């Protein structure tokens, strides 16, 4: 944390709310993160839907100590922060994100078997979920093969409790480690964790660091067979950017079925279109903006409310500010 000390002193003395737009804040971030910080980064580059305005700063911390220092600095200057995974479940509004966005893909990748219990896997939050699934299969470890085909990082998968009907990541979690906004690290075992349908509850501002997954020994060939079957069953639009399912399924029904039945497949607002392959997907068929996608979401919700009296809940997460044009 040594590098932060002089910067923190300035912060405490001035004790005012700062913005990443201010040169002294940029300089401080640049000093610590060097080439691991980018400014005014279009988030369309970091989301699978390919929409989103600029984040003031995107940082790629290399270790935990660096995050602790950063959180302290941001708290002193009252600068907001957020975390992104692979952006595959994310709509960033066109006005972008004020504050600092953390991306853990550089410093927090990797997975390994626990040395004292080889069916326990430690997966870091910045590791790619598809890589983890393949690695586990190669190791002859079963339990996450149904997650094949789901893009994202381990942190994002935990936050979303990613999965399919046959299984979710939360089913195999033994414990999760996160850093709270005050820099404290908590290692919480499954009995105290709340995984729900596409939702995982952690304290506000907490950053997921890693998880231990309880897998089972299995035959690699059989695991691969199951993965192949899962991939064959996947039914999704190809060729256009998307964010997977936009809405959660309402109890005892499917959002896609309701949207299809309402005749909304193929409906388009500028570059955003309800997929004609899977009605719970919105695809970016041209140069869609976040505003186009959010307008289409509003239209779908309104129609489903009118026709079925059901309020569809968003599965995708929305971050950032609207642009002045909205
Ligand atoms: C083609 C396609 C198919 C998909 N199919 C499926 C599917 O079958 N099942 C399914 O469940 N999902 C599916 N998804 C959605 C998406 O892949 C998952 O939700 C995935 O787990 C999101 O991971 P991510 O790393 O991209 O997270 P992001 O989209 O980047 O982030 C999701 C949320 O997690 C938060 N977050 C990310 N990392 C951290 C962290 N380290 N600490 C704290 N918060 C964090 C973000 O702030 C955000 O709120 C699909 C998406 C696409 C594009």
Image (spheres, rainbow, N blue to C red):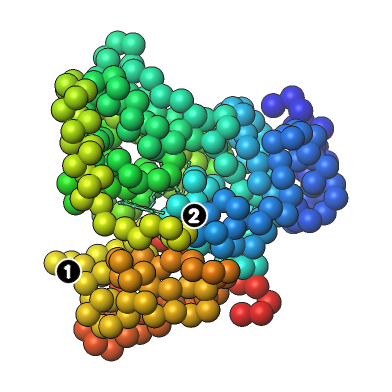
Q: Quadrant of residue 193?
A: top left
**Mark 2 C-beta closer than 8 Å to ligand 1:** yes
Comes first in the chain, label 2 or label 1? 2
Instruction: Between residue 243 and residue 33, name the one nearer to us.
Output: 243
Say few, some or many: other residues with alpha carbon within 10 Å of mark 1 (under 14 / 14 to 19 / 20 or more): few
- Residue topped by disc 2: 48
* Secondary structure of the residue carrying numbered label 1: loop
Instruction: Between residue 251 and residue 264, name the one nearer to us.
Output: 264
Quadrant that contains the C terminus: bottom right
Name the mark nearer the viewer: 2 or 1: 2
Q: Is residue 31 visible?
A: yes
| 189 lies above or below 297 | above
**Residue that appears at 43% across and 66% down:** 283
- Residue topped by disc 1: 253
Direction from residue 18 to residue 308 in the image, left or right: left
Outermost residue to the front: 239
Count the labels in the image: 2
């Amino acid at each position: 944390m040594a590098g932060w000390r002089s910067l923190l002193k300035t912060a405490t003395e001035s004790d005012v709310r700062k913005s990443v737009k201010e040169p002294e804040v940029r300089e401080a971030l640049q000093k610590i993160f060097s080439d691991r910080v980018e400014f005014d980064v279009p988030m369309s580059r970091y989301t699978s839907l390919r929409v989103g305005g600029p984040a003031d700063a995107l940082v790629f911390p290399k270790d935990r100590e660096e995050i602790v220092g950063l959180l302290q600095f941001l708290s002193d200057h009252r600068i907001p922060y957020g975390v992104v995974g692979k952006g595959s479940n994310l709509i960033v509004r066109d006005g972008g994100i004020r504050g600092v966005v953390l991306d853990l893909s550089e410093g927090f990748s990797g997975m390994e078997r626990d040395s004292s219990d080889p069916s326990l896997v430690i997966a870091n939050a910045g590791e790619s979920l598809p890589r983890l699934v393949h690695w586990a299969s190669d190791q002859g470890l079963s339990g996450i093969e149904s997650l094949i085909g789901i893009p994202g990082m381990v942190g994002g998968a935990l936050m979303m409790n990613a999965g399919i009907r046959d299984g979710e990541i939360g089913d195999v979690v033994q414990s999760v480690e996160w850093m709270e906004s005050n820099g404290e690290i908590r290692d919480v075992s499954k009995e105290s964790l709340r995984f729900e349908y596409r939702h995982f509850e952690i304290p506000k501002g907490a950053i997921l660091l890693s998880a231990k997954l309880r897998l089972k020994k299995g035959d690699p060939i059989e695991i691969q067979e199951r993965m192949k079957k899962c991939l064959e069953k996947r039914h999704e639009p190809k060729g256009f950017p998307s964010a997977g399912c936009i809405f959660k399924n309402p109890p005892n029904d499917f959002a896609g079925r309701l949207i299809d039945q309402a005749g909304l497949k193929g409906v388009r607002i500028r570059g955003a279109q309800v997929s004609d392959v899977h009605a719970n997907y919105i695809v970016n068929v041209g140069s869609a903006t976040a505003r186009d996608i959010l307008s289409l979401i509003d239209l779908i919700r309104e129609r489903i409310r009118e026709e079925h009296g059901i309020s569809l809940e968003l599965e995708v997460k929305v971050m950032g500010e609207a642009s002045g044009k909205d």
